Structures are given as structure tokens and as C-alpha cells.
């Protein structure tokens, strides 16, 4: 029962007994102080909203809450059940995968509310950050970057190391997000570049630094079994089903959210078919590889992160899903083994194939769709 | 790890290695071409919605998206996690159950968008099908018919055969739906007849054709174990909890959706009690049979599919649930063994008791409620 | 396969075979009669809503349904998957935990619609109870009280005894809720006092009455194993993720719901860090105890039940979560063993630490926040 936890790190146990409580307590107290200084309710979650509503002649349902809350809850499920259970596939680390995902996401979202607040929504006159439902969604998004990185490190790092990875991950995320969205004025509602490409390469960089030569020995411990694979499928399916909410959660009201959902739903369906096809082609005796199904079937949605809200057309979405399913499965078959052999880069969950490459391609797809959009198509912006 | 996949079909492995990729790639490319020719965004998901909104003096929240999206996500969970995990109860086919459910639903929803579009919403002036959130819900519904049929075939067919079953299932679904809803002008929002009765008898017909004499031998392989049963309960519960969304997803705005949720919620609660009662009556030593709990507790909602949106009254819903729990459990105890012995009809998941019979009775209940409705009750239609 | 069910009770099997069906059938028939006499659709779920809408110049989206439905579905998941799977952690009772949770919640919510109706919403002129979406949420809440009590009794009572516990639990709930909300005019939207404190002490009182001296013998049977613990984590996570919906489901439209979500989300994140810290401090060799993670990480939300809708401020929520994580984990380490040794009080799931104490403290926190609120903060009520 216990060794599943300890097996996540090669460290001295007394050290963990002191360091993990110390880090958690000190950082949580720091969060309380910083929240006390900076964080307040925004206009729509403050008790003064009634006045505002009256002044602007709004009805109850015009609160931002009702536009975003269903999507928020779906994204929340993706972060904790989706990412968490996707990481249970290693039979020795099942509990560690979902358990440390829980810990670092809980810390990460608090730190994200502060970091994203300072960079994006600090009110310079009052010196406060005003948070609402959209801030909570963005904080979950920001955590996703560090959870993706965790996927490359699964089974190799201690909980304290993971907390440090999350601290820096969230900080870097806020900076790169600021550069891409605020300075370069890109749109990236589902975070192909901002979340997936960043999280993927951040995790790979750390994994490269932490390379341990006794790779083959640890590999023996990393096998999956029948039930750990079924638990991982729970994670896969909740990510797959709720990804339309992920890509539409912070897009424009009305047609923006509506279109992002349709495009993501279609791209995901298309991915699944090409993953099953590619996987059975490359496996001995036509058997399907569970790792491909668990991961690559999500690649279509990662690559739609930027373009989902655009007028990419339904068949455009199908085409994106089609190629992403193939590219991602190829990655698991050829690229991950190559990275391990040649670059000494261990990537436990294969985040290079699920997040890094599809995220980067998603950025290109978004750029192409945006560049080819005519004024006639987006008449409302014309 | 691998034999769970291959065990789904008695086929030659080299054949699978060629045929599954071929079917997936060719059919997916056909989908892309057909989507390119026919499918476009509808008015509310198109970038021109801003003009439409202005012209009709609407606010952001008046987009159909906000009326349907929470229900859509629940239905989506039912299709992939609900049906998928319900089919994990066979310990040898757990992964195949959820994995092939994933594949055929992903193909089925694309084909459904086309088939339902051609029959129901083809714009004859432009020759295009315009899709929005309601189309996605209907596509999920349409898949449900084929997934129900899969329940009778579990453990007996190959993935390629399942793809063919889905292709024909979706096609037939669109035709019978057109006849029932458009030609006969029935209302069947939760699909008692259109989805459950159709899916049940479609699956049973195929199972009858595919009868294999070595029944008893395969039965030995079909047992469940403790953990596969717990995974199946995940499927049961997500179906049970979200069925109010299923029956209300495409009903009228306002009181229609509201009433369908209340009626389904009540009928389901009533079913559970009579299933536990009937099951413990018929089992040796009062033990409960997990198969009954996993399936029959859902029968109340299947039978409310047609009537849920009507003024059936809360106690009427309780009565429907009461009898459906009993009838469905009786089916598992007496009818399924009879069908196997006498008609050579193998029904792995017992879809006859969960979908076919409750669906048919649901159609009758709907007809009775509609026939007895007075103008006073439905004053808005008066 | 079967012994998991029968092991829940030490009773004679023939007795169960007669008594469980008898109780289920008789009580369900009683429900049908009482629903027939008392329960009707409310204004917003009745077919006459169209007239009402016209008269008051409302639009479709102004139906209460659209304000509450997403939260309702989340609460529903908490009751059946959250509480149900949280109780699967005992490897011998996994199926019994989730299976009897299903049975008693299905009965409890019907009885709750009646009891809460009689106490809170009986229309004295017509003698009817009018139900809508908010009634369904309240019925789920009312069940939660009895499900919490089940947590203390897990593995020690028969299904018929559980039905009786639920019958009295729901009845007492409606009475104490009437006293606290209607006579004392407290506000307790998330039910710190009304649900958690009540459910906790109700369960402990019954467990004390049912004390069996062969404690140590049964303890041997109560162990968890790796997979039963992973199933329990599914329960934990769905409770944790959807608790913002629980605490906001019946608060005021607009800023009330919005603020309750933010406060609960923040308090939960804070709890998680202090639970991990406290747990690893007290365990030998720094290993984390799964029981703490599964339960105590929820304590922050229990304690926010009363205060979540108030202007407690974001850092106030963090502070509540911080201390509740510590107090609850301390409870598992010190108080539960003490209660068993000294007071002969067996508490299988530790509901004293998760519900009773945090619920009571939540009541105090709510009172303090309400007492210190200035008129300026709540200007809308000024």
C-alpha cells in the first residue's frame, strides 16, 4: 500500500518526512499572505453586483457566471480526473500518478491566480487583482502546463521536486502567455501554443536534465497491467469528452463558444479513427496498442486549440484530426524510442507526441486559418 | 495485455492488420469529402451570428448553445463513459468493450451528422446541411442505437464487423427516425422508440444471424470478476445520473426541458427500488445479482423516453419506473435464458430487457399519455 | 461475486430474501400514493409556463431551470459517484459500498421530496407540494445526510437496516432543517450545519448503538487494497471537483452563485496542501496515508458550506481550507483511534473528521462572517 508513494522518488525517507510538510506549509502560508494583499472578488462575484446590474439594466442571467460555469466544471474534471487518471497506467505508480497530480494542481492553481493576475489583470489604480469565473478557468489552464510536464517525469521525481517544477512552470507559463497573447496579440483560446507546446517542451527539458543512466532497469518497473490500463482509459475518456469545453471555455460569447465546440468535437472523432488504423498497422499481428489509444486519440483536440474558434469549417476540422491521429501515433512508434536511444531523453507518457508536436502544429494551423480568413467570412469584425 | 483486443474476434490476425486500417482510413477520407461538400456551420455558430443577433434584437445568451450545452456534455459522457464502461463487465473483454465502443461511436457520430442532415435538415436551396449544438446531440443519440446493438454482440465480432454494423445501424436509424418523427409526426424526444426499441431489435437481429453453436464454451470465457464489475458500475451510474439530460436534451425550451428532467429523475429512483427487490427475491439466499443492478435500474428512464416531456405527472413517472424495474429484472431472470435455449439468440448484455422491451413499452406509454391529454392541461398548445 | 453483498450484514439469508423485497415494494408503493396525493409540477415546469412567461414578459432563458441545472447535475454526480465510490475503499465491501449507496439514495430522494415539501413548500390553499429543479437539488442534499451516516456504518449493517436508517435520517433532516432555516432564520446554502454536522452525528449515534465487541476480528476484514483505493479516489475527486457546485447550487442568482464557487474552489485547493503536509509528518518514513488524502482534502469545502456565499474574501477561504486540512487529518491520526478505544465508537470512514467536526466549525465560521459583515460590504441588502 505504501510503496507506491515512496517509489516515486529515490530519496531518503527522513528527508521527505521533513521537506514535503515544510514546502507545503510554507508555500501555503505565502499564498494566504499574497491573496490577502492582492486578490479580491471581481464586479460580477461581489455583493455590489446588484447595483451594477441595476445601473446597466441587466437581468440575473447576464452574469458572466452563466456563460462560463458549465465549461469551467468540465475543464476542472479534465485537470483532476483527466490528467490524473491518464497517469495511472503504470501499475507501480498508479496511486502516485493521480495523487501527485492532485497535489501539484492544487498548489498550481493558487499560484496561477496570482501570476496570471499580475501579468494580465492587475488594476494599477488599486493594486488589486479581481477574480471571477474566467480567472478560475485560466488558473486551471495554467496548471495544465505543469501537469503535462509531469507526464514526462512520472516515476522519476519526488513530490518536493514536483512542487518546484510546478512553481517554476506556472511562473514561466504566465510570462510566455503574456508575451504571446498580450505583446504579440495572438489568439490562442484552447492553448495549442500557450499550454500544450509550452508544457511539452518544458517537461522534456526537465526530463533531459534529470536523465538517469539506469534506464533499462527502471523500465522493468514501468509496465502497465490490465486494470491500471482501464483506469487510464477513464482519464483518456474524460479528457476526450470534455475537450470541446476546454477549447471553448474562454472564447467569445455566442457563436465563438458554439463554433469552438463543434470544431473540437469533429476533430476528435476524426483522430480516433486514424489512431486505431495507424496503431493496428504497426503492431505485430494487428493488435492495438493501448498507449496509442490512451494518448494519440486526443491529439486532434490539442492541434485545434488555436483554430477551434476560427471559421476553419467542419471539414477543415476533420482534416486536422485525420493527420494529427497519424502523426501522434507515428511519434509513439518511432520518435519516442529514438529520443530515448539517441538523445537520452526519457518521456514516460510520451508528451512529445501528445502535446509538444500537436501543440506546435496547432499554432501553425491557427496562423494559416487566420491569414486566409477573408473579411467576408468574419463580417462581424469587418 | 494484447489478447483482450484480439479475443473480440475469431478472425485471422493478418486480415485484421490489413482490414481495420483500410476501413478506418477509407471511411474517414470519405467523411472528409462528404463534410466538404455538405456540412456548414448553422446561423448560431457562424461568425455572421453577430448580425443576426443585432437584427433580431437578441442578447448573447439567446444563442441555442446556452440552452443545450450542459445537456450535450452529459449525453456525450453517457455515450463514451456510460455505454463504454457498462460493457467492461466481462473480465476478458473489458478493454475491448470500452475500446471498440470508442471507435464505433467516433465513426458513428460523423456518419450520423451526414445521414440525419440529409433526412432532416438539408437546405434544398443551397444543398447544404447546417449544423449546431442540437445536431451534435442528435448525432450522439444516433450512435446510441448502434452502441445498444453492440451490447448483444459483445465478445463475438471483430472491429471491422462492428464498423459495418455501425454503418448500417446509423443509416437505418436515420430512415426509421425520418418515418417516425417526420412522416408519422410522433414526438419522441428521449427516443424510447427511435433509439432504444430500434437499437435493441437491430442488435438482436444481428446476434441471431451470427449465432455460433459453441455457446457453452464461450460462456466460460464470459464471466465477470470483482473489479470488472466495479468498472461496469461506473458505466451504470453515469448513465443513470445523466439520463435526465438525455431525455431533456432536445425538448422544448423552458418547461419542456424542466419537466423532462423531473420525470426522468423520479422514474429512475423508483426503478432502483423494484430492481433490488425483484433481484433479491429470485436469487438463491437473497443475494443480489450485479447484472440486474447494472442494467435494470436504467429501464425506468428508457421507458420514459417518449413521455418524459409530457404532463405525465410525478406519480405517473413513479409508476412507470416501478413496473419497468420489475419487468426488466424478470427479463434477465427468465427471458434471456429462454431466448438462448429456444431461439438460439445470444444477448451478451441483455439488451432485450434493458432497451428493446422498455423502449417499446415507452412508446405505448407516450401514446397513452398523449391520447389522454386534455386541452386544459396543455393550454399552451390549445 | 456474491459474498460481497451478503458480507454487509450478519443476518440470516432467508430473512434478507423476504425482508428486502418487502421493504422495497411496500415503501415504493407508499411513495406512489403519497406522490399522487401531494406532488405536482411547479409553475416553471408545468405546461402552463408559457402563459406565465407571456404575462411577466420573460424570455425562455428566464426559467429557473437554466440557473440551476448544471449545478444540479454536478450534485447528482456527487451523491451517486462521489459518495458511492468513496465507500469502495474496503476491498471486501467495494460493491456493497457503492451498491447500497445507490439503493438508499434512490429511496431517500423520493422521501425527501415529500418531507421537505411538507415542511417548506406545502401550499396550504391547495394542499399540494409544487416541485421544480431546486426541489431536486434539495432532495439530493437531504440524501447526503443519510449517506454520510452510512459512512460510519459501512460493513456493519444489512440493507434493510440501511433503509430504516435512511427513513429516519431523511425525516430528522427535514425537521432540523426546518428549525435551523425557517425558525432560526439561519442561512446555510452548502449545509455545513444542516447536512454535514447533522449527518455526522446522526451516523455516529447509530454506530455507537450498534457497537459490536468483536471489533478486532472484523478489522482484519476491513483492509483496503491497491485497486479498491484507486476506486475510492474516483469518489474523492468527483466530490472535490464538484463541491463548488454543491455550495452554490441553491444560493442567490448572479453574484451569490458566482462567489460561492470561487470561495469553495479556493478553500479546497488550500486543504489539499495541508493534508499532504500533515499526513506525511505523522506517517512512518514520510509515506502518505491514502485515507487522509481520500477524505481530509474535502474538509475545506465542508467547512465553507455556510460561509461560501458570504463576502468571506478569497484569503479568508484559503485560511479556512488551511486549518481544516490540518484538523481533519489530526482527527484521523488521533481522534478516530481514541473514539474506538475509549468510547466504543466505530467510525469506518471517519465521518467524525470529515463531516461532523468541519460541519460544526463551518457553522461557527458562517456566524462569525455574518456577524462581522458591515452594511457597506453587502450594500445590496442595506
Image: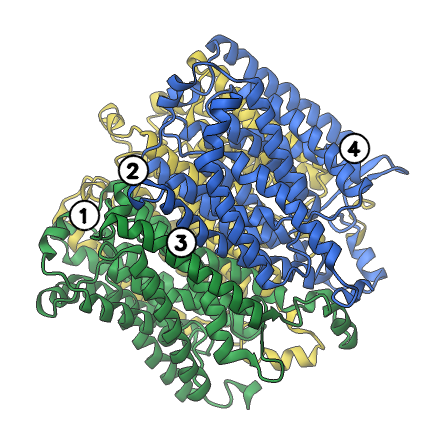
Chain colours: A green, B yellow, C blue
Mark positioned earlier in the residue sequence (1 or 3): 3
Q: Residue B152 versus residue C200: which sits nearer the camera? A: C200
Q: Determine the residue located farthest toward the right in the rendered image.
A: C125
Q: CA distance from mark 4 to mark 1?
A: 59 Å
Circle 1/circle 2 CB separation < 8 Å: no
Q: CA distance from mark 3 to mark 2?
A: 18 Å
Instruction: Using a 10 Å C-alpha cutoff, classify the residue at mark 3 as few (fewer than 14 neighbours), some (14 to 19) or many (20 or more).
Output: many
Q: Which residue is mark 3?
A: A102
- Taking the image as shown, residue C324 lies to the left or right of residue C135, namely left
Q: Which residue is mark 2?
A: A1
Question: Are the residues flagged by discs 1 and 3 from a single subunit?
Answer: yes
* Residue B90 location (% of width, % of height): 31, 34
User: Residue at 19% across / 65% down in the picture?
Assistant: A210
User: Is residue A239 something one can see in this rendering?
Assistant: no
- Please give the chain letter of the residue carrying mark 2: A
SS for callout 3? helix
Q: Which residue is mark 1?
A: A223
Question: Are the residues flagged by discs 3 and 4 from a single subunit?
Answer: no
Q: CA distance from mark 1 to mark 2?
A: 18 Å
Q: Nearer the viewer, mark 1 or mark 3?
A: 3
- Please tell me whether residue B353 is drawn above or below residue A201 in the rendered image: above
For residue A152, what is the image quadrant?
Answer: bottom left
Q: Nearer the viewer, mark 1 or mark 2?
A: 2
Q: Residue A5 versus residue B172: which sits nearer the camera? A: A5
* Residue C166 location (% of width, % of height): 62, 27
User: Is residue C231 something one can see in this rendering?
Assistant: yes
Q: Which residue is mark 4?
A: C38
Q: Nearer the viewer, mark 3 or mark 4?
A: 3
Amino acid at each position: 500500500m505504501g510503496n507506491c508513494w515512496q517509489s516515486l522518488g529515490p530519496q531518503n525517507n527522513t528527508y521527505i518526512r521533513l521537506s514535503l510538510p515544510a514546502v507545503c506549509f510554507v508555500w501555503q502560508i505565502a499564498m494566504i499572505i499574497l491573496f490577502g494583499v492582492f486578490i479580491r472578488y471581481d464586479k460580477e462575484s461581489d455583493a455590489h453586483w446588484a447595483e451594477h446590474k441595476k445601473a446597466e439594466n441587466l437581468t440575473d442571467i447576464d452574469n458572466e457566471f452563466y456563460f462560463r460555469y458549465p465549461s469551467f466544471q468540465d475543464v476542472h474534471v479534465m485537470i483532476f480526473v483527466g490528467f490524473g487518471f491518464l497517469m495511472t497506467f503504470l501499475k507501480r505508480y498508479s496511486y502516485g500518478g493521480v495523487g501527485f497530480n492532485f497535489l501539484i494542481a492544487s498548489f498550481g492553481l493558487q499560484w496561477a491566480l496570482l501570476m496570471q493576475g499580475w501579468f494580465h489583470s492587475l488594476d494599477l489604480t488599486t493594486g488589486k487583482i479581481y477574480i471571477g469565473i474566467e480567472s478560475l478557468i485560466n488558473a486551471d489552464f495554467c496548471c495544465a502546463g505543469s501537469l503535462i510536464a509531469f507526464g514526462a517525469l512520472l516515476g522519476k521525481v519526488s513530490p518536493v521536486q514536483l512542487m518546484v517544477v510546478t512553481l517554476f512552470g506556472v511562473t514561466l507559463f504566465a510570462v510566455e502567455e503574456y508575451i504571446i497573447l498580450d505583446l504579440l496579440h495572438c489568439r490562442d483560446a484552447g492553448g495549442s501554443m500557450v499550454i500544450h507546446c509550452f508544457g511539452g517542451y518544458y517537461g522534456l527539458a526537465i526530463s533531459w536534465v534529470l536523465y538517469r543512466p539506469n534506464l533499462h532497469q527502471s523500465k522493468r518497473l514501468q509496465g502497465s497491467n490490465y486494470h491500471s490500463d482501464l483506469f487510464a482509459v477513464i482519464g483518456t475518456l474524460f479528457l476526450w469528452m470534455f475537450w470541446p469545453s476546454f477549447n471553448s471555455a474562454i472564447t467569445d460569447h455566442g457563436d465563438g463558444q458554439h463554433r469552438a465546440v463543434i470544431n473540437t468535437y469533429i476533430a476528435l472523432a476524426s483522430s480516433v479513427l486514424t489512431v486505431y488504423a495507424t496503431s493496428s498497422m504497426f503492431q505485430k499481428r494487428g493488435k492495438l496498442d493501448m498507449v496509442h489509444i490512451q494518448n494519440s486519440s486526443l491529439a486532434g483536440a490539442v492541434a485545434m486549440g488555436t483554430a477551434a474558434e476560427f471559421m476553419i469549417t467542419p471539414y477543415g476540422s476533420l482534416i486536422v484530426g485525420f493527420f494529427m491521429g497519424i502523426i501522434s501515433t507515428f511519434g509513439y512508434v518511432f520518435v519516442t524510442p529514438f529520443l530515448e536511444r539517441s538523445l537520452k531523453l526519457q518521456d514516460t507518457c510520451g508528451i512529445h507526441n501528445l502535446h509538444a508536436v500537436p501543440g506546435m502544429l496547432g499554432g501553425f494551423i491557427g496562423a494559416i486559418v487566420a491569414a486566409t480568413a477573408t473579411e467576408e467570412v468574419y463580417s462581424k469584425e469587418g
